[in-house]
Amino acid sequence: MKYKFLIACAILSQTINLQAKEGFKLNKDIAQYKGASFENALRVERNISLDEAFAIAESDSDIDYFVYTKGRMMVLEVPSDVKLDENSNYLNLASKRGYKFNNGSVGYGYCRIFRHGDVVFFKNEGKWFGSAPGLADTYLKINKN
């Protein structure tokens, strides 16, 4: 019984942690769309906690929203009609490689790979959302300084 209680507390703690913090709006299961240029990306951090992501966003007035990878891995293949150049890939988010999706299908080409705890911080200009069920959540600042 003691272990069931501890497990329930751990799950509740994680659920509370995934809720939006005051000053932010949670868009659950939403990420920057794979076809977006990502030119509005300001910063990327790898393998950080959600609390660390909130602290970074709160401390930088240029950040309007961020995408937090909550799933194990999220692969965003870059469509062939999306131009990649220094402006859209200055954070080195895209690379040309083979990749494998959760459903087992494989591909080769430019893609952006994010793992649990990876966060990309954005400005609003160029915002373009897509669905990311179980993979990522977006947090928008609602009280911008």
Image (cartoon, grey):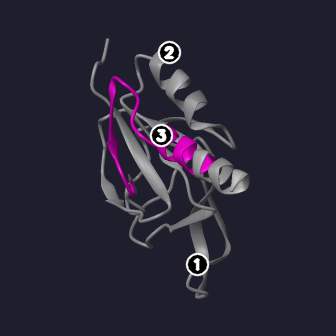
Residue at position x 44%, y 60% in the image: 83
From the viewer's perspective, is the residue at label 1 or at label 3 nearer? Answer: 3
Residue 74 appears at what percent x and percent y?
A: 56, 63
Q: Which residue is mark 3?
A: 16
**What secondary structure is marked by label 2?**
helix
Q: In the image, is residue 3 above or below residue 132?
A: above
Query: Tag 1's secondary structure?
Result: loop
Residue at image location 48% in from the left, 67% down from the top: 78
Q: Residue furthest top?
A: 145
Q: Which mark is residue 102?
A: 1
The part of the image, by quadrant, that contains residue 96 is: bottom right
Position in image of residue 90 (x %, y %): 57, 41
Q: Tell me how far mark 1 sits from mark 2, CA to CA.
A: 35 Å
Q: Residues within 10 Å of mark 1 (few under 14, many from 20)?
A: few
Q: Quadrant of the N terminus?
A: bottom right
* Residue 126, quarter of picture: top left
Q: Is residue 142 left or right of residue 80?
A: left
Query: What residue is rendered at 59% in x and 74% in y?
Result: 109
Name the residue type under label 2: Ser
Task: Give me the C-alpha separation between circle 3 and circle 2.
Answer: 22 Å
Are the residues flagged by discs 3 and 2 in contact, CB closer than 8 Å? Answer: no
Farthest-out residue, front: 1
Query: The C terminus lies in which quarter of the figure?
Result: top left
In the rendered structure, the answer to whether residue 54 lies left or right of residue 9 reads left
Which span of residues is magenta-colored? 10-30
Badge 2: how crowded within 10 Å, few (<14), some, or many (20+)? few
Question: Would residue 104 be seen by someone viewing this image from the given angle?
Answer: yes
Mark 2 sits on what residue? Answer: 59
Going 72% across and 54% down the picture, which residue do you hit?
Answer: 3
